[in-house]
């Protein structure tokens, strides 16, 4: 696994999503405080390419602002149908920054 610096942690919205362009990808970074961690997914909703980083977060569920599809950030799977999902990337907090492996993928549960 090769992690690269994605964004300073201070630029990430607490308990919400932050949009980041990185290596020709549009990513959404979700920062949680208890426990402190980050989840990085593809930003585009597979339904209509809605901006997931701008979606409302409730627990580990993000709601796409375009058509209200919901995704479990822990798995990347849509709560309406397991046929829809977003890619999750290995990520961690290190040196007050978010580091990500855009070539890797976190396995869904």
Image: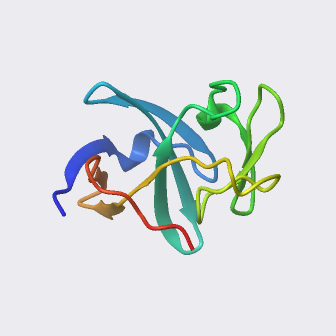
Q: Residue at x 58, y 50 (%)?
A: 14
In this picture the colour scheme is: rainbow
Count up the numbered dots.
0
Residue 47, above or below 42: above
Q: Residue at x 55, y 43 (%)?
A: 13
Q: Residue at x 41, y 64 (%)?
A: 106
Q: Residue at x 61, y 58 (%)?
A: 73
Q: Is residue 54 left or right of residue 7?
A: right
Work out whether residue 19 or residue 44 is closer to the camera in this orientation and state it. 44
Work out whether residue 31 or residue 67 is closer to the camera in this orientation and state it. 67
Percent x, y for residue 19?
49, 32
Quadrant into which the C terminus falls: bottom right
Percent x, y for residue 62?
71, 48
In the displayed orientation, state which residue is furthest to the front: 83
Quadrant of residue 59 within the rendered picture: bottom right
Quadrant of residue 35 within the rendered picture: bottom right
In the displayed orientation, state which residue is furthest to the left: 2
Quadrant into which the N terminus falls: bottom left
Percent x, y for residue 32?
57, 61
Work out whether residue 89 or residue 56 is closer to the camera in this orientation and state it. 89
Percent x, y for residue 28?
50, 40
């Amino acid at each position: 696994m090769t992690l690269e610096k994605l964004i300073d942690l201070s630029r990430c919205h607490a308990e919400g999503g932050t949009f980041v362009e990185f290596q020709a990808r549009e990513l959404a970074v979700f920062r949680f405080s208890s426990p402190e961690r980050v989840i990085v997914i593809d930003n585009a909703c597979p339904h209509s390419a809605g901006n997931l980083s701008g979606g409302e977060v409730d627990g580990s569920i993000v709601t796409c602002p375009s058509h209200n599809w919901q995704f479990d950030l822990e798995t990347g799977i849509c709560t309406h149908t397991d046929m829809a999902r977003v890619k999750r990337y290995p990520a961690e907090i290190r040196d007050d920054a978010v580091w990500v492996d855009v070539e890797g993928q976190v396995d869904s549960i």
